[in-house]
């Protein structure tokens, strides 16, 4: 996972947390937990996407 993907993911997570907390859908604590889970899962999601792409190319 490159730094670019990490930074883009981090910005996306921060935006989601701010938007979620601002609209009152989730509390800041819940948003932080979701953000951490997304950040931890993102490398696996990227690998899964790459694997499915390789499978489609055959």
Image (cartoon, rainbow, N blue to C red):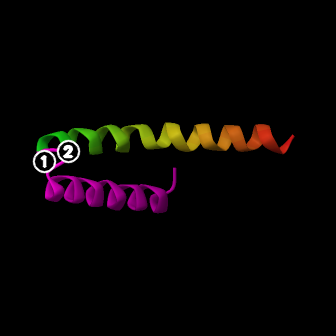
The quarter of the picture where the C terminus appears is: top right
User: Which residue is depicted at the point 33% across and 61% down?
Assistant: 11
Was residue 57 drawn as part of the magenta stretch in this picture?
no
Most common secondary structure along the magenta stretch:
helix
Q: Secondary structure at mark 1?
A: helix
Q: Secondary structure at mark 2?
A: helix
Please tell me how crowded label 1 is: few (under 14), some (14-19), or many (20+) other residues with Cα within 10 Å. Answer: some
Q: Quadrant of residue 29?
A: top left
Image disc number at residue 28: 1
Q: Give the percent coordinates (x, y) of residue 32.
A: 20, 44
Image disc number at residue 32: 2
- Are the residues at dot 1 and dot 2 in contact (C-beta closer than 8 Å)? yes
Q: Give the percent coordinates (x, y) of residue 44.
A: 51, 37
| Between 28 and 40, the one nearer to me in the picture | 28
User: Which residue is depicted at the point 68% across and 38% down?
Assistant: 51
Range drawn in magenta:
1-28
Q: Give the percent coordinates (x, y) of residue 30.
A: 17, 39
How far apart, in angstroms, are the residues tagged by discs 1 and 2?
Answer: 6 Å
| Between 8 and 24, the one nearer to me in the picture | 24
User: Which residue is depicted at the point 47% across and 62% down?
Assistant: 4
Was residue 3 drawn as part of the magenta stretch in this picture?
yes
Taking the view exactly as shown, the residue that stands out farthest to the right is 58
User: Which residue is depicted at the point 39% across and 61% down?
Assistant: 7
Q: Quadrant of residue 47?
A: top right
């Amino acid at each position: 996972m490159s730094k670019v993907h990490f930074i883009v993911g981090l910005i996306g997570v921060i935006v989601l947390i701010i938007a979620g907390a601002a609209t009152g859908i989730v509390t800041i604590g819940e948003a932080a937990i979701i953000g951490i889970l997304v950040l931890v899962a993102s490398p696996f999601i990227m690998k899964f996407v790459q694997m499915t792409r390789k499978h489609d190319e055959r």
